[in-house]
Amino acid sequence: MHRLVVRLIMVAFSVVTVIANGEENLKFPKDFKWGVATCEYQNSGSTKCPDSNWAHWEQQEGAIKTGEISGESTCHYDNEQRTIQQIKALGCNTYRFSVEWSLIEPIQGEYNEEVIDHYSDFVDELLANGIEPMITLHHFSHPQWFEELGAFEKTENNKFLVLFAKKMFNRLSDRVKLWVTINEPGVYAAQGYYWADFPPGKKLINRQVFKPTATVVKNLMMAHASMYGTMKRELNGRECQIGLVHQFLKFMSANILTQPFTTHLTYVYHKGIFEFLKSGEFKFGYRFGLGKEEMKIKKAKEMMDFIGINYYTMPLVKAEMKMNFENTTCDEEAGEYMTDMPFRAYPQGLGEVIRECHEELGLPIYITENGAPDREDKFRGRWIRDHLKQVSDAIADGCDVRGFYYWTLNDNWEWDRGYSQKFGLYEYDFETHRPTLREGSREYVRIIRESK
Ligand code: BGC
């Protein structure tokens, strides 16, 4: 009760202290967290992380559309000070990054304490610079030994991730207050099993199509619940917030013919998971509804302290497609445009999913990823403004959004698309290893500055 009163007073206070921002009249609470998000593997690559499932996957003929390998990427692991200075130059006060499991436990059961010390020192440095860390424990990459055991195809493997989570949590939770268990279970499962674009690239297990996707999603949700429970038990009076990051990827139809396909895809990426978070009942259908993976555990509210929204687009599908967005389009008459990937810019979708989360889950919200690939820096500024306007409006309507993390700091390894996509606020020169702030990114700097 006492806590509730304190929270209400805090909310009232922050509403009173909102500051008008520029012509768009963006308003954010004083204590709003401004951030950028990255992933270690995408920024340190196979050179630094040779024991990752991705380092193995990349070597296979045809696995990466551009034929590249990740190599050194932006040398993130060995450039903590540069990263910190970049974050500060943006005016951000929080940083979401992942601790790379394959570096920490390259051999099953053997932890590399030096790597753990490295992350611990990095956390100290961030805090000393006024930057609050948010740690992701699993961001698509994991040790190859875990992959070879069958990763999330088998429920009994979840315990390995739970042990890793416990180890890192015990070491860092005295200083790190924001934790993400798993990044985008729906994308991990769909890309790895439904489309087979990500490791392990298996469409079939025991000659079953689609069932592997359902099984993997189910195991990921169980892994999340176990991680949450274990970490909470280790709190010892510390106050940490633990959440799940989900990509709210909803597909829309450009014509009636694609309707069944978009409904199905939305279910695979998003709805099957969201329904479970709402109700605690997991019923993931496959084989045209004849088969189902089922379980009942806990509702979102009982197994997460916040929901992390990753939002990029709501693709407008004009023909059935592979997951390369080539058969998607946008409504130019309505002022929409396509990003380089190419996916459709649809900022109002962000407002929609924030409201949905607020109403259906009733949890605090962080926008844990939002950004666009824009090689020529044609629309980055507009993208930033339009999406933050949606966040600002949702907050004004009472949604409890506490922070926003732009994806991403530097141009980096975009998984199966190699280095072809330029998501960075900073353009990264992979020869000289020099980052340069893009013009369009100055919108983010301005909005942050005017909101403080
Ligand atoms: C992932 C990132 C990825 C980004 C842009 C998200 O699905 O979490 O790792 O780089 O989207 O495609």
Image (spheres, rainbow, N blue to C red):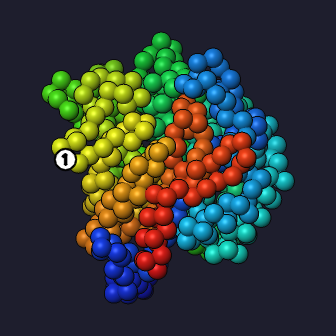
- The structure residue drawn at horizontal position 70% and vertical position 56%, both measured from the top left corner, is 168
| Label 1 environment density (alpha carbons within 10 Å; few <14, some 14–19, many ≥20) | few
Which amino acid type is marked by label 1?
Ala
- The structure residue drawn at horizontal position 42% and vertical position 38%, both measured from the top left corner, is 340
* Residue 88 image offset from top left, x and y in percent: 61, 69
- The structure residue drawn at horizontal position 77% and vertical position 64%, both measured from the top left corner, is 121
In this view, 412 is above or below 120? above
- The structure residue drawn at horizontal position 26% and vertical position 39%, both measured from the top left corner, is 330
- Residue 92, image quadrant: bottom right
Taking depth in this image into account, of 371 and 404 the one nearest to the observer is 371
Evaluate whether residue 243 shows in this view: no
Judged left or right of residue 20, residue 306 is right
Judged left or right of residue 353, residue 247 is right
In this view, 29 is above or below 163? below
* Residue 375 image offset from top left, x and y in percent: 49, 43
Evaluate whether residue 315 shows in this view: yes
In this view, 371 is above or below 445? above
Total marks drawn?
Answer: 1
**Residue at the extreme top of the image, as rendered:** 207
Taking depth in this image into account, of 99 and 108 the one nearest to the observer is 99
* Residue 141 image offset from top left, x and y in percent: 63, 39
**Residue at the extreme left of the image, as rendered:** 256
Taking depth in this image into account, of 222 and 387 the one nearest to the observer is 387
Q: Which residue is mark 1?
A: 334
The secondary element bearing badge 1 is classed as: helix
Q: Quadrant of the N terminus?
A: bottom left
Judged left or right of residue 179, residue 339 is left
